[in-house]
Image (cartoon, rainbow, N blue to C red):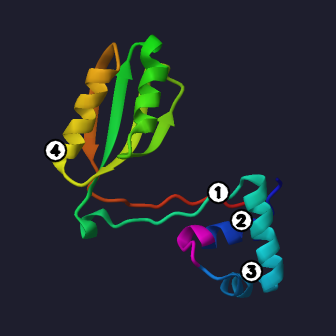
Amino acid sequence: MNLDKIDNKILQLLLQNGRTSFTDIAEQVGLSRTAVKNRVQAMQQSGVIAGYTVVLNNSACGAISFLVEVEMDAESYNACMQQLCNSPLVSNVIQTTSKTKLFAICQAPDVNTMKGLLQQICNVVDNVKAVRASTVTGVVKRPIIDKV
């Protein structure tokens, strides 16, 4: 799907607040409510918009966020990726050009649960060379799309 400037503006508004009404978006982009609804539906059907989610303030609900880097032998890459994807603590698994490292964004209710995930990775995945975790202390910028 080719996105124009209006589509990108609609996406930016939804990224700032996924509950923004079509009427409010229409006012900001200069289209009718129906035109905005049709554009959003087209972006959903094409896969540009993959879904909507809740963004938690982890400190307000007592949870911790942490980043995990797992380094393993290349033959264990898929098993490690599967292990991370199957964990309810992991919200994102990030692949890079490296075939021996994976990164994950995780949330846990407490440090012991976080340690349990790290131990589980070491116990279940063969040939793990290193597991590094860093607690998130703040988010400086939320993700947004590139402007056209």
**What residue would you read off at disc 2?**
8
Q: Quadrant of residue 2?
A: bottom right
**What residue would you read off at disc 4?**
112
Which label's residue is closer to the chain start, 4 or 3?
3
Q: Is residue 130 in view? A: no
Instruction: Indicate which disc residue 29 carries.
Output: 3
Q: Residues within 10 Å of mark 2 (few under 14, many from 20)?
A: some
In-front residue for pair 109/67: 109
- The structure residue drawn at horizontal position 35% and vertical position 20%, both measured from the top left corner, is 125
Which label's residue is closer to the chain start, 1 or 2?
2
Asked whether residue 18 is drawn in magenta, I would say yes
At label 2, which amino acid type do we have? Asn
Q: Residues within 10 Å of mark 4 (few under 14, many from 20)?
A: few
Relative to 98, does residue 147 appear above or below in the rendering?
Answer: below
Which label's residue is closer to the chain start, 1 or 3?
3
Mark 3–mark 2 CB contact (< 8 Å): no
**What residue would you read off at disc 1?**
146
Residue mark closest to the camera, 2 vs 4? 4
Secondary structure of the residue carrying tag 3 is helix
Q: Quadrant of the C terminus?
A: bottom right
Distance (Cα) linking label 1 and label 3 = 17 Å
Q: Is residue 101 left or right of residue 124?
A: right
Residue mark closest to the camera, 1 vs 2? 2
Mark 4–mark 1 CB contact (< 8 Å): no
Secondary structure of the residue carrying tag 2 is helix
Q: Is residue 57 left or right of residue 25?
A: left
Asked whether residue 133 is drawn in magenta, I would say no
